[in-house]
Structure formats: structure tokens, C-alpha cells
Amino acid sequence: MHDSNRVIEPNAGPAESTRARLLEAAGEEFSSLGYEGATIRSIALRAGANLAAVNYHFGDKESLYEQVVIHAHRMLVPHEPHEEAVGMPPREGLRVWIRSMLGQVLGMQAQRGWQHELILREMMRPTRASAALVREVIGPRFGCLRLMILAIRPDLDDRSLNAFCFSVVGQCLFYRTAGALASHLVGEAAFHALDLDFLAAHICDLILAGLGNRLALPVLSLSQMDQPTGLGGA
Amino acid sequence: MHDSNRVIEPNAGPAESTRARLLEAAGEEFSSLGYEGATIRSIALRAGANLAAVNYHFGDKESLYEQVVIHAHRMLVPHEPHEEAVGMPPREGLRVWIRSMLGQVLGMQAQRGWQHELILREMMRPTRASAALVREVIGPRFGCLRLMILAIRPDLDDRSLNAFCFSVVGQCLFYRTAGALASHLVGEAAFHALDLDFLAAHICDLILAGLGNRLALPVLSLSQMDQPTGLGGA
DNA sequence: TACCGTTTCAAACAGGCGTTTTAATTAGTA
DNA sequence: TACTAATTAAAACGCCTGTTTGAAACGGTA
């Protein structure tokens, strides 16, 4: 039966359980084709399962998608990239954070590809499944960025702080959301010249310049890192 | 017949020609629902035309979409907003340009709504129809931005120049592509506080600081930026 | 063995989609 | 008026979608 609240896959069945194979196949399909673009038939075919297996294990397409997003985020949480930035001086941590996010945005062809792809899709068009995602994945990363910027400029009010954070994220996401357009605009060669190292440095320098030259550089602690942003979601 | 190369609508027929009404209705549907989301039936219904009228006047759905995009850009070209920025001092022109683009991104509910919406959709996921759009609408605007930044910093090489331009556009587009997520992240109230005036000023100040606006803020050089602070050791 | 809950399978269902067809209607012209 | 071409209208076609069905196969237990 398709009890959506089941949390664990006790012990995988033959080779790998049909349910697990469906989750993997669905992740690839959803991430590359989007929710509407992906079809139950194609997912089942890719997983080597029967068409009705999706409805048997997950109930319907939307529930499958929700489970896939949660599955993806579970695989990603243990490797939170922003944690490298913890404990660094804020300016250096900011540089690491930006490079990390930009690396995810640009180099999607690396391993654990579809999980990041799926999460970025959720960022752009949130669905029912993204509430948990914001709370458990995106929120902490954003909170980390927020703390670092606040450490650089403790005098910032909430509004300016948010604006600076969005300036960072916006510049990073641009190369995903409008990369195709940008390539058309400046030519493929010029666009290709904007590699990860250069762009990360550019964005970081720009933000730091905008933040101005101030003093006071406390070091972030891990306990601070997972604090809510203070402004809460939903 | 559906001669796609026809350019003019000679003199509107009854009240408004079916073709014109279809273009308008299709523009609204495509802009709000996307290409796949919009349906021929819904478009025809909204236009008060028969289902087959779409195929009669435009051939198929894709050709209709192409004509809609061209139609939208034709309605927009006479009011190129960036032209206000021409002839101004570069820093002031930059401010006007950013405010203009951000206004289009944020205040979509204003008049001439769906045209901007459609163009922004094309920016994010280019289709066959967007080659002309880049050439005739987006390209000139981008070129204007490019010239202003170059006027502020004539020493920039192409790569950095492009990066600065994309930093401007990326920050503006963010509030469209990830506005829903951003609202979830910081809360609806805090997100609402980021109004047009504030954001335009923030983005412009940030870019000017990055470009080395020696008039307003004490800006530090890149070499200073990474100096050890003596406060935070990892 | 016989039983029973779980899982898989092939097939069909119901609905929406873009598209096509065919006929009716309209407008222009001689 | 009659003829012609352009336009509109209603209905159906073929395809693909998510979903459901009912029977077959499997696995553990008595």
C-alpha cells in the first residue's frame, strides 16, 4: 500500500526495492524535465518497474514528487556545503559560501546531480514539497549567509541585511535561471570565460565593497549557524 | 489562411479582428500559464473565437506563440524604458536603468502586464521565438547598461564588464525567479518591506561601490580586502 | 500442503490535449 | 442576382496523460 507516512525502507528487497528504484528514477526525470514534463510511464520504465507500481507505492504523481524532494534533501543534508564556512572569519567564510553555491549552480554535471537540480527547481517555483525544503536545507544555508554578513556589518537593519543576502543569492542564481540568455547576449565564448573561480571572486568582491570597510570580525560558531533567521517562514 | 509572414492587420474587422483578439488572449494565457500550461481551447474561449480559429490564423500552437512574442515586443519597443537613461551622467543613468528594470520585474500588475511577463519568461527559458527578442529588445537594453558601466570604469576588460552587467541583471531578476522562495525565507512582511525604491537604491549603491564609487563611501581596495584582521582565527 | 497478505503485471479507463475535417456563413465582385 | 474566396463554426480524430482494475505471482506461516 502507499502509506505516505512511512519513513524507512526496512531492508531493500530484490537487489534494490522497487520503491527505491522508483525514487531514483523519478528524481532524474523530475529534475531534468520538471514536474509536468516527467511522466509516470517514463519513470516506471526507467526504474524497470511496472506502470502501476508508482500508484501502488506512492498513491499518485504528486505524492511521488513530494517523496522525491524529501529523498533528495535527505541525501544532501549530510554534506551541507556551507558548513565549510563555519568558524572562518566572516569575509573568508563569505567567499567560501559564495563559491560553494556558485559551484552548485554552475557545475551541475558533477555527482549527486539531480538532487541539486531538483532543489534549485523548487527554489524557483515552490510547490507543496518545498516547505520542508526551505526549513531544512535552504533556510540553514541562508541563515549562515545572513550571520556572516551581519558579522561584517553588525549595524545593518533587517531590511538591508536581507537585501544584501538576496544580492548574493540573486547573482549566483542568475547563471542558472538566465544562463542561456546570457550566453546569447555576450556570445558563447565570452560567457564561457566566466568560470567558477572568476565569478566567485567577482561576486564576493562586489558584496564586500558594498558592505564597506568596517572592523569587528567575530568568528561564527556552529551553534549560531542553525539558529532560525529570526523572521521565520510560512 | 495562416500565412505566418503577414506583417500588418490592414483594418480590423468586426469590432476587432479575430486574429487580433487571439493574439491578445494568447498573450495573457501564455504569460500567466507558460507555453505548456496554456491551451488552445482556453485561448479561443477567452478571445470569443472558435477553437479552430487558432489553427486557421496561425497554423499551430507554436507559431501562435512565436507571433505573440513578436507582437508583445512590437508593443513594447516604442516605449523602451532604458532610453530615459541615455544622455544622463553614467551614475545617474545607471540608477534610472536599474529602477526601470526592477520596476518591470516587481510591478507586473501595472498596465501592459503580460508583455513584460512574456519577455521575462523568454529570458529564463529561451525558445525559438527569443532570438529576435534578444536582438531587438533585450540586446539594446543590455548594451545600454554595458555602455554606462564602461563609462564609469573605462579600464574594465570585457570579462569583468560582463560580470558587472550580469550582477545588475541577476539581482533584479532574482525577485522574479525566486520571489516566492525569498518570501518564505524571511517572512512575507519582511519581504514586502523590500519595495521598489529601496531595492533600486540598494542594487545601484552596491554596483557603484563595486565599481569604486569614490564619492560616497570609503571603499577599500581588493588587496586590503583579504588582509588578516587579527581578530578571527579559524 | 494450504492459506493469506504483499507485491507485480497487463490491460483498460476517463479525460485533456493539439490538430484536422467538413460544412455553414459571410463579404466582396461582376 | 449569382459566383468566388475568406472566414467561422461544430464535431470528431488520434495521441498522450494520470489513474484504476482485477488477476497473477511471490513469500512467509501454520
Image: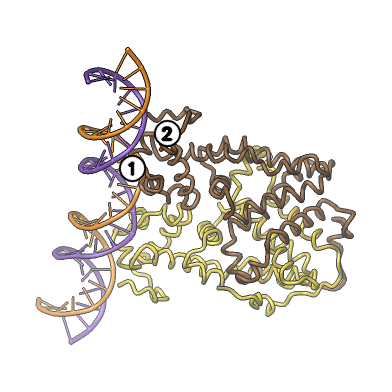
Chain colours: A yellow, B brown, C orange, D purple
**Circle 2: element type:** loop
Badge 2, how many Cα within 10 Å: few under 14, some, many 20+? few
Q: Is residue A33 left or right of residue C30?
A: right
Q: Is residue A199 left or right of residue D21?
A: right
Q: Nearer the viewer, residue A24 or B59?
A: B59
The vertical placement of B32 against C22, above or below, is: below
Q: Check disc 1 and give the amino acid type.
A: Leu
The x and y percentages for residue B181 are 57, 64
Q: Look at 48% across and 45% down and name the residue there.
A: B27
Give the alpha-carbon distance from disc 2 to disc 1, as whole Å: 19 Å
The x and y percentages for residue A54 are 33, 63
Q: Which residue is mark 2?
A: B13
Q: Look at 80% across and 63% down and name the residue there.
A: A211
The x and y percentages for residue B3 are 42, 28
The x and y percentages for residue B109 are 57, 55
Eye-nearest disc, 2 or 1:
2
What is the number of the mark on residue B51? Answer: 1
**Image quarter of residue A231:** bottom right
Query: Quarter holding the N terminus of chain A?
Result: bottom left
**Circle 1: element type:** helix
On what subunit does the disc labeled 1 rest?
B
The vertical placement of A127 against C28, above or below, is: below
**Image quarter of residue A44:** bottom left
The vertical placement of B127 against A167, above or below, is: above
